[in-house]
Image: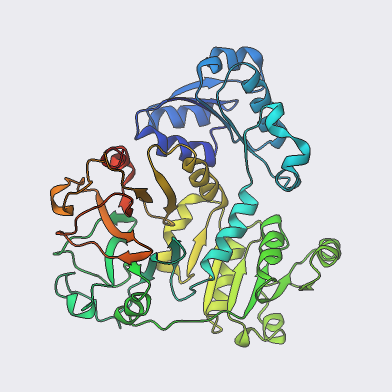
Amino acid sequence: MRIIIAGAGDVGFHLAKLLSFEGHAITIIDKDPDKLKYASNHLDVQTMQGNSTSYSILNGANVAKADLLISVTSSEETNLTTCILGKKLGAKKTVARVSNTEYLMQQEDLQLTELGVDELISPQLLAAAEIKRLLKEPAFTDYHEFDKGKLSLVGVRIDSSSPLINKTIQETAYLNPDSNFIPVAILRNNQTLIPRSDTFFRVHDHAYFISDSRGIDDVLKAANKQRAVIKSVMIFGGTPVGYHAARLLSKKYRVKLFEMNKERCHQLTENLPNTLIINADGRDLDVLDDENISETDAFIAVTNNSETNIISSLVAKNNGIKKSIALVENIDYIHLSQNIGVDTLINKKLIAANSIFKYLRKGDVLSLASIHGADVEVLEFEVKKKSAVCNKALKDCKFPKSAIVGGVIRHDKGIIATADFVFEPYDHVVVLSMPACIHKVEGLFK
């Protein structure tokens, strides 16, 4: 595919990085020569300096032959204009990053597709949805469901109390007598490992498992964790992410939102009738004590300052919070969650880039998930009668070593696939893969 990305910031760079593994012809447009130089030195892409709303720049990037035009600059107006012009000049599909969520809420009335904008992406809304998802199973650092929970991807931090410590996967098989789960990735010292039978679990590993509906409790037991239930939530930060998170969460939980700006508090009070808005600093332990933090289940820090979010989350965690989530701007911070004590760090730009990546999948990809801080993607495929894996045992399918089959959904039942498992037509197969071999995995299911 010919792909043009307008914007060489965090979203554009990460997206180009994901796409560069698959041999797409990628051109990045940006006004900043330093960002373009960095992208050119680290990725196999072409670069063009200039404004993406310029006819000559788009024409020079050969937009008329572009299969996809993605505009993810920091300017909403630039992104919309770029897509509108690009579509008029011949781009087959366009995606624009927006910050004003009214565009998303009123897509039908605005008829943006007729103007030339095929898809809209809001990092703020996506981050809020991510927070909601992470609270569903708070004992885990990460949680994704496939086919309404028939299979689940779960992440858990391995502490010194876990019976898994310093044992291989083969040696810990006794903890999984009914084969209800399988380890599919380990994040260790910022490195992502695809585990095999002789892989050891170490203290402070972030381990990820695919589990069937019965295996969630077994994974927790193996990690010496207890299942938790969220009833009350504190949010620190009346930012757009904080607002949308409160709007989503207040439908299910008791929500308090701390915001230091009094005028912003008045705005939030008008728009969040089911949320208690408090004009205070969420880092102030006296304030948190007054608001009964010891009786609160989850703390979510989403101010515009990464360090503030991390510190306030640590304060909350030290006061008995079951689940802490902090929003960070620096993508490199994502790896720190292994060591600093915050349960989960999220980055809205990374979430947005991964969301856009879903539009580019080939074959029968039913769903796609990403793991925070890990260099892997989790994909759900449907087996077709002509697929290379159809009617073959897993051990005979020649999956790349940088990929692993987690499980299969067949006849509405989740199954953890063993080496002798034979794929049948219409099976839904959940595969974890490193980016470099995703295209090989996809080829097995075409």
Specify the quadrant of the image occupied by residue 374. bottom left
Q: Which residue is located at x 58 percent, y 65 percent?
A: 132
In the rendered view, tell whether residue 279 sits above or below residue 17.
below
228 displayed left or right of 218: right
Percent position of residue 24, x then y: 39, 27
Instruction: Compare residues 325 and 218 and report the one nearer the observer.
Output: 218
Spot occupied by residue 277 in the image (x, y as percentages of width and height): 78, 72
Residue nearest the observer in this picture, 277 or 444: 444
Which quadrant of the figure has residue 249?
bottom right
- Number of callouts: 0
Quarter holding the C terminus is top left
Q: Is residue 205 left or right of residue 373?
A: left
Expressed as whole percent of the image width and height from the top left, the position of residue 98 reads 67, 41
> Does residue 432 appear in the picture of this structure?
yes
- Rendered-image quadrant of the N terminus: top left
- Tell me what residue is drawn at x 82 percent, y 66 percent: 265
127 to the left or right of 165: right
**232 versus 371 height, above or below:** below
| Protein image colouring | rainbow
The residue under the point 64% across, 83% down is 293
Q: Above or below — where is 261 with respect to 358?
A: below
